[in-house]
Image: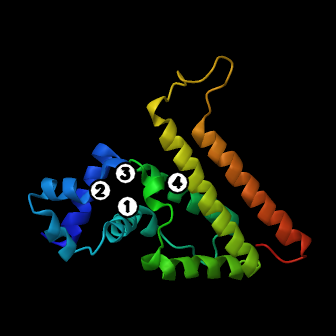
Amino acid sequence: MNRRTVVAEALDLLDEVGLDTVSTRRLAKRLGVEQPSLYYHFATKRDLLGAMAEAAMAPHADAPLPSPGDDWREWFLENSRSFRRTLLMRRDGARLHAGSTPTADLDRIRSKMAFLVASGVPERDAQMAMLAASRFTVGCVLEEQADADSPDGEDLPDGVPVLDQEEAFEAGLALILGGLERHAAAGALPVG
């Protein structure tokens, strides 16, 4: 048993039972070991959850970084879409990710920020837009995953329309991007 195996099994357990039911006791039983042996790899459950969050984000973390000639607007949208797709890959993926610190991804985040700034987006605007898009995406996926138990809207009162989650996400993302474009243009800065 190694750290990678523990995390992979923990993510499989997450998909089966959900975040509220994941425990080191259940994980140890699943691995066929005694619970204290997990502490050799992870000092606390919080450490385990952090490693699970990092591993769950691998598809997004492995996505290509932007290139100098890329349109920053298209990249901004696709980066958020990739983040959403990755969060949706795991049961309770947004809850697992929320509050985690992307320490392994810091160089990639810096590279993304440098790309936006080199494209003419003011640094502070780029930081705030990336933060807003990230939190908006996590919030959308939290809602989407919470609604997963009643996808057809059978729990909704009469007359309340069923929300198309992807359409709502795209609309909100477009508003964030539009606000960033207008803000940058108001400052008479080049944006692209």
Q: Quadrant of the C terminus?
A: bottom right
The amino acid at mark 4 is: Arg
Mark 3 = which residue? Answer: 19
Relative placement, left or right, of 182 versus 115 is right
N-terminal of the two: label 1 or label 2? 2
Between disc 3 and disc 4, the foreground one is 3
Gap between marks 2 and 3 measured at Cα = 10 Å
Q: Are marks 1 and 4 in contact (CB under 8 Å)?
A: no
Gap between marks 3 and 4 measured at Cα = 18 Å
Q: Is residue 71 at least partly visible in the picture?
A: no
N-terminal of the two: label 3 or label 1? 3
* Picture quadrant where residue 59 is located: bottom left
Residue 71's label in the rendered image is: none
Front in this rendered view, residue 44 or 77: 44
N-terminal of the two: label 1 or label 4? 1
Residue 11's label in the rendered image is: 2
Secondary structure beneath label 1? helix
The amino acid at mark 1 is: Ala
Gap between marks 2 and 4 measured at Cα = 18 Å
Q: Is residue 96 at least partly visible in the picture?
A: yes
The amino acid at mark 2 is: Leu
Residue at 38% in and 68% down: 50
Q: Are marks 3 and 4 in contact (CB under 8 Å)?
A: no
Front in this rendered view, residue 185 or 47: 47
Bin the neighbour count of mark 1 within 10 Å (Cα to Cα): few under 14, some 14-19, many 20 and up: many
Q: Which percent across, then down, holds residue 96?
A: 43, 58
Q: Are marks 1 and 2 in contact (CB under 8 Å)?
A: yes
Residue 56's label in the rendered image is: 1
Mark 4 = which residue? Answer: 84
Q: Quadrant of the N terminus?
A: bottom left
Q: Which percent across, then down, holds residue 116?
A: 67, 76
